[in-house]
Image (cartoon, coloured by chain):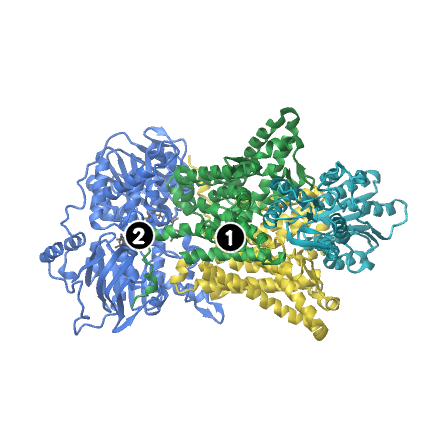
Chain colours: A blue, B cyan, C yellow, D green
Amino acid sequence: MTLRADLQGLTPAPLSAARAAAPAEPGAPPPALRAEGIGKSYGAITVLSDVTLDIRPGEVHAIIGENGAGKSTLMKLLSGHVLPTEGRLLQGVREVAFPDAAAAERAGVVLVHQEILLAADLTVAENLFLGRELTRGVSVDDRAMNRRTAEVLASIGAKCGPRDRVGSLPLAQRQLVQIARALLEPRRVVIFDEPTAVLAGDEVTALLDVVRGLRARGVAVLYISHRLDEVEALADRITVLRDGRMIGTWETAQLSQRDMAEKMVGRALGHLYPAKRGAASAAPLLEIEEISVDHGAVLASLVVRPGEVLGIGGMIGSGRTELFEGLLGLRPAQGGPIRFDGRALPRRSVSAWQAAGLVYLTEDRKDRGLLLEEPLAANLTLQALDHLNPGPVLAPRREAEWLAKAIEEYDIRVRSPLLRAGQLSGGNQQKLLLAKVMLTDPRVIIIDEPTRGIDIGNKSQIYGFIDRLVRAGKAVVVISSELPELVGLSDRVLVMRAGRLVAELSGDEITEKSVIYAATSGAAARGGAAAQARENHTAAQAGTGQGAV
Amino acid sequence: QDKRIIAVSIPAATHGWTGGVVYHAEQAEKEIEAAFPHIDIVVKTSPSATAQVSALEDLSAGQKLDALVILPFTSEELTGPVEQVKAKGTFIAVVDRGLTDPAVQDLYVAGDNIAVGANTAKWMAEKLGGEGKVVVLRGIPTVIDDERIQGFTEVMKDTKVEILDIQYANWNQDEAFKLMQDYLAKYPHIDAVWANDDDMLLGVLEAVKQSGRSEIKYALGGNGMKDVVKMVMEENAMTPISTPYPPSMIKSAIYMVAGQFNGQAPMRGSFKLDAPLITPQNAEQFWYPDSPF
Amino acid sequence: MTTVSDIAPPAGGLSRIRWMDMAPFIALALVIVLGALLNPNFLSATNIANVVTRSAFIAIIAVGATFVISSGCLDLSVGSMMAFVTGLMILTMNKLAPTLGSNAIFVGAGLGLIVGALCGLVNGLIVTLGRIEPFIVTLGTMGIFRALITWMSNGGSIPMERSLREPYRPVYFGDLFGVPIPVVITALVVLAGAFILYRTKYGRRCIAVGSNAEVARFSGVSVTRIRTLTFVIQGLCVGIAAICYIPRLGAATPTTGQLWELQVITAVVIGGTALRGGKARIWGTIAGALILEIIANLMVLSNMVSEYLVAAVQGVIIILAMLAHRFIR
Amino acid sequence: MTTVSDIAPPAGGLSRIRWMDMAPFIALALVIVLGALLNPNFLSATNIANVVTRSAFIAIIAVGATFVISSGCLDLSVGSMMAFVTGLMILTMNKLAPTLGSNAIFVGAGLGLIVGALCGLVNGLIVTLGRIEPFIVTLGTMGIFRALITWMSNGGSIPMERSLREPYRPVYFGDLFGVPIPVVITALVVLAGAFILYRTKYGRRCIAVGSNAEVARFSGVSVTRIRTLTFVIQGLCVGIAAICYIPRLGAATPTTGQLWELQVITAVVIGGTALRGGKARIWGTIAGALILEIIANLMVLSNMVSEYLVAAVQGVIIILAMLAHRFIR
Ligand SMILES: Nc1ncnc2c1ncn2[C@@H]1O[C@H](COP(=O)(O)OP(=O)(O)OP(=O)(O)O)[C@@H](O)[C@H]1O
Ligand SMILES: Nc1ncnc2c1ncn2[C@@H]1O[C@H](COP(=O)(O)OP(=O)(O)OP(=O)(O)O)[C@@H](O)[C@H]1O
Ligand SMILES: [Mg+2]
Ligand SMILES: [Mg+2]
């Protein structure tokens, strides 16, 4: 209580406190959706309680809070995906109950999930129209559905086609398909749960435009994001959640980004990025000479040195993920040689790499990172089983200790250590994933989108963590679509475009502008000449590279 | 090029007795083809009535069959299809189970499953002095099984022998073993056991042996499996008789049919194999140590 | 240095998918070529007609199974259900024959469809409302149907009245413009199945449910209803197969349709439908049914192996056919 | 205005899981109570000993199946494999008996384990390297093994030498401190299985692979190796079951182990292991095997139903037992 009072003393009082009982103040338009004292408990675990919130037509209402604060849970309560255990919902003055998501959608309330929820075997159009197929007579009207899908996709800047199978799309495109699904029909309330976490660049811009367009049409938008700049640029009002409780609602103009962050975490924050270490000159730990990945990176050579953070930049779909998955043996790749610590690797496989001291942390935590149905401890130790247990036998008691240690070290917010991984909030899953690969005690860590879905406070912790690793003589490769992160963190940056490494930047060359320039226009910044030459050399043999830019 | 083709269509070897049928059919094929190069015997097994009908179609589709020897899965289901084969001028020999339209079969080597049940029952009733308690194990729900049970129960009806229980054990040693264990647990007093097939009898004997129960006077089977014939020869107290239902009847039929392509007049008509009891006295005649059955 | 060849084929997702979709038909072609090589009679008109006609039963039931499987379930009870439906139909027709004459056949056929659909409904409801693994539910009902036919036939057989045989015969043995009736019926069933599966909302939702039931649920698709209906469709298909089956054998026995469930599932999977659901290849299913029937036919036509080993050779050919899928890909 | 039904059971994640884990044991208890009510002989020492002893085969094989299923595969070939292994063992022992005397049994047993493991390896490699649905692969090998035993036995039976029967007999009929040997062996197998599954890295990886093969792959787990090994374990379990099985009747026939695969899978699923993988309940599996054997026992001990309907009642009880799971939850 005192803490909250303190914080409220620092900044203007909230428009509505958590306990606000009266409906919206007179004169304001009636809310499109109103939650009164809503909350959710799973058995003895209360994850959200007593939240009172209006969402008005024609406003963008941002919800911010730390990982595990209960944002996604609140959104699921509002959209019928989860049933509340306390409180009630009103549309206008009418009390409503959404027994399931379909009922909420019929009432004009739709949620774009934080995690991808699509039928992988169906096409994009089939997913969009699932449950509301267009028909001509008894027959489905694929032509009309494809046409309409193409329109919606174009309107949000998605590059996939209506006939693509969703399972074959990269993560970002799948996220756009989810968004398209929500926008297919006119809605009264559209809820976005971290829509931009897997997007970057143009796609983010396009999405923000879409959100503004919705607002202009009088739609009420709820918007969750850990990117506070987005929130500031987009939101009309901001509600802050912390530890399953509502801290308050403010007009955006009342809060700076720093205010937002501090309200989220309940304490003052220091610098986001640690000081840089400067280019490393030690003998390389990892040397790759020209590998090509099927349908992905065409040819790439790179070195990674101990004591540096190597950033990999590029547009989404430029093949960064493919390159490193190919390197790890997770997808077919040719070429080499590849040397680690001066020695050639006998076999390209995750376990061989791991034994040598290199690990890769996937960008797709739901389908490739964590066993959502399994307990936290089993997830934590899965990758490091050989490292942690010398014999074939497990040590259950020590597993509990490792978990406790990881929970503490990585600040994983769990209300019970006995939960399954799928029951963690998105950001906490990401932290668990990080803890999981770090348990193998690697010397080179390749992190694909390290802070996807991570709140600002934890971001700073993770950056600090990366810094400590590197200062301890390890090497970290960061693949990131978040430019500020790439620029703020990296000692050296390689930029990929259309499956090729096109530029190498270091020191002061590393700016958002230069990265974007290299990623889009192809004219390399200084130091990228060699890569450029290589590109010209190979372009003829390799044909046109894959991947859209 | 006038090789004479004799097609033999029999059930697949899914349990002991049918296994014996396949064995004897293949023996006949070898022997006859070796002796008479101008005769070609084609043995085809089928796992079900449907498959047997298909096999008949396949055998007669591309070639003219001079003769067909068939052990039909069931009478009703095979009558029509065999009739069609006959329509193309094929000599039809039916083994074991007659077709519903007897006019179709030129030669019929009939087993008598009812007699297998009835003869066993008569012997058993007599030895038990016309009264007692027996349990029965039956096979897979098929006509053979049904007829044997029918023969047995009909005879027992007229005696004071009480049939405590009849359950399926699928002509399977294991299941018979388990079923007998359960019978023993369920009935404190059993005078005799009848398994309608010798395969099952072996399971029964093992269970009785394990239980150590001494009141069981007889455990009988049927079919004349070689292990059981051996027991009869050795005057086993519990199994002093068996009832032959020799799978070699298929071999006899094939030989009878082959004769007509070898200068003899075709053999027509019905030949009924009776089911005389195999006793220690005559067991020698039923002893085929080389048969797998 | 690098294997350029591996980059070269700009094989987009599309052409790869197409090839995979062709796999069952290529396997079918291979089996046919094998047949022609092994025995010249294989390609004779009669033999081909025989094989295609008799594959009708498995094919028809497998069309239903394609629905069930693509929606993420499994039905092991089809073989027993077939026997049960057949038995009931024959009993009914026999009872009605004295009064209705050959019209009894129509009543019997109608009853077959209704009973089939009801049996399917029972399976479906237990699976969906009871939320039990379909494998276990249909294993249970498989035992139940099998026991019922055994009971109805007193462990023997249920033959059809002689008087009905002639009028009913053409349904299996007759033809329409030279095409055997069962083939015509199969074609109609497949066309209807393909239409429902690929061109209607229901079919779309079936596949969605199989692909991701949770997504389907929050999209407003009633998973319970969709899945239950697939079982009803399966039951209907069993009823249709029973209608074609009776004139062929003229009787129902406790062994009728035994192990058909395995053949049906094999046909569906060979056809390219995934057992985990979410993918339906109804034309492939037909190819699968034909492949199985042709392999059985070849076993009869060729004299290569001991009769004891026929099942082994069939097993090997099926595995090889599936391996061929992989290499074709 | 919340739907209270969803709140009512204040069963936290934890206690709910515990209850569900208990379900097979509760079902087992119910079946035992039912048995005691139906027939007082049911609880007699002999009957209980009989039932428990003979459930050993299914239980042992089902332990292996728990591995295979929890890693996301399925093995339909176990019954036939059992027959094949048994046949080979007996042939070997018979051949060696004249020279080795009763030591031939040890050689035969060793051979059984090796052959079982090899059969499993073949299944596993075709499934993993060939990337074919396990359902189809093991259906194929099921046919192959069954054909091989039929061929080896010429369709008849392969009896064990008389001279070996007596020395070998105790392995089924003997006991250790009053506990039948097969029960002791089952207990050892289950303990070993539970240890491997719950206490070793391999077991952990098995479940990870079944839960999400892609995640496992990204975590450096060789999905191919893990899955192949589950099939080898399954094969070993079949070998162990064969060792206990032979002394019971002393013969292998083409019907040995018929339809055991279905019983095994049913036992595993009743035990609470999910067919889609990622969840293994090895103790539940044992409860499942016992439940099946007790139901069969009750069918004989009670006089309620016609012999024709036994399978139906069994089906109904199994479905009811699974429904009970749901309500217990
Ligand atoms: N089924 C469940 N059982 C128990 N706890 C749960 C369950 N589902 C979610 N939780 C808990 O609820 C809390 C809130 O989760 P939620 O997903 O709403 O957080 P969030 O604010 O969206 O966080 P993030 O920014 O990381 O996405 C978490 O601590 C999570 O562990
Ligand atoms: N619209 C699309 N349709 C199909 N495939 C695509 C599409 N866009 C990209 N891809 C595939 O994705 C590959 C690159 O995606 P990838 O996710 O690896 O890029 P990335 O640079 O790692 O971006 P991200 O930040 O999303 O990880 C391309 O080579 C291409 O094969
Ligand atoms: Mg969230
Ligand atoms: Mg990526």
Q: Looking at the image, how many numbered discs can be counted on the residues?
A: 2
Question: Closer to the camera, D243 or A245?
Answer: D243
Is B28 on the left-hand or right-hand side of A15? Answer: right
Q: Amino acid at mark 2?
A: Val
Q: Which residue is mark 1?
A: D36
Where residue B157 sits in the image (x, y, percent)?
A: 73, 57
Q: On the image, which quarter does residue B105 sit in?
A: bottom right
D121, above or below B184, in the image: above
Q: Which quadrant of the figure has residue C61? A: bottom right
Instruction: Estimate the x, y position of residue A21 in percent, counting from the top left.
Output: 18, 68
Q: Chain of mark 1?
A: D
Residue D239 locus on image (x, y percent): 55, 37
Instruction: Tell me which residue sits at (50%, 35%) in the image.
Output: D177
What label sits on residue A198 in the rendered view? 2
| Crowd class of label 1 (few under 14; some 14 to 19; many from 20; radius 10 Å) | some
Q: Secondary structure at mark 1?
A: helix
Please name which of the two marks, 2 or 1, marks the residue nearer to the observer: 1
Same-chain check, marks 2 and 1? no
Name the element at disc 2: loop
